[in-house]
Image (spheres, rainbow, N blue to C red):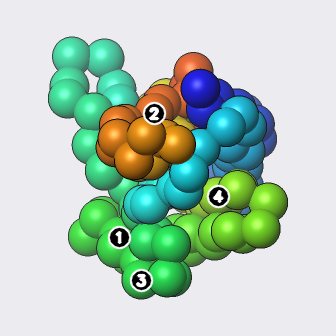
Amino acid sequence: QVQLVESGGGLVQAGGSLRLSCAASGIAFSINDMGWYRQTPGKQRELVARIASGGTTFYADSVKGRFTIYRDNAKNTVDLQMNSLKSEDTAVYYCHAVIVNIQRVQADSWGQGTRVTVSS
C-alpha cells in the first residue's frame, strides 16, 4: 500500500513563496499522474496542478505562471513551487497520485493535507 506524505505548508505573506513536497512510499507497480489539489471550507477540492510520469503538466488557470510542479520518478516525489502567492491561494493542499499496484489495479491515493495560509 502506498502512502503519500506532504510537507512544506505554512504561513506566508502575499507575494511570497512556498514549496510543497510530497513523497510516496510503499509497494506499487507504478505511479501514473501525480499532482496537487486544494480545498477551502465549503468548497469542493480543486485541481491545482498535475504531472504525468512522462512529464506532461497541467495547471489550473488561477495558478498558471505562478506555480510550477516538479516530479522525480526515481524518488517518487512531487513538489509544488508556489510563487507570487495571493490570499485566495489560502487552502489545505493535498498531494494526489494514481497508483498502479502489483496486480495492475489502478487507484487514487491522497496525502493527509498541508495547510497554506497567505496573509494580505
Residue under label 4, please give it: 78
CB under 8 Å between callouts 3 and 4? Answer: no
Question: Which of 26 and 12 lies nearest the eye of the viewer?
Answer: 26
Which residue: 56% across, 51% down? 29
Q: How far apart are marks 3 and 4 (CA)?
A: 13 Å
| 102 or 93: nearer the viewer | 102
Residue visible at 31% across and 17% down?
41
Left/right placement of residue 14 relative to residue 12 reads left
Sequence-first tag of 1 and 2:
1
Which comes before the other along the chain, label 2 or label 4? 4
> Which mark is on residue 109?
2
Amino acid type at circle 3 is Thr
Q: Which structural element holds mark 2? A: strand
Marks 1 and 4, how far apart at CA: 14 Å
Tell me residue 120's x, y (percent). 55, 43
Image coordinates for residue 58, horizontal then vertical, percent: 34, 73
Q: Which of 118 and 109 is in front in this view?
A: 109
Res. 59 mark: 1
Report the residue at 42% width, 60% height from top.
33
Tell which tag, 3 or 1, sits nearer the viewer: 3
Give, as a three-letter code, the residue at label 2: Ser
- Nearest to viewer (mark 2 / mark 4): 2
Q: Reply above or below: 42 against 63.
A: above
Q: Name the residue under label 3.
A: 56
| x, y percent for residue 25 | 73, 37
Q: Dividing the image into 4 quarters, which one contains the N terminus?
A: top right
Q: How far apart are marks 3 and 2 (CA)?
A: 20 Å
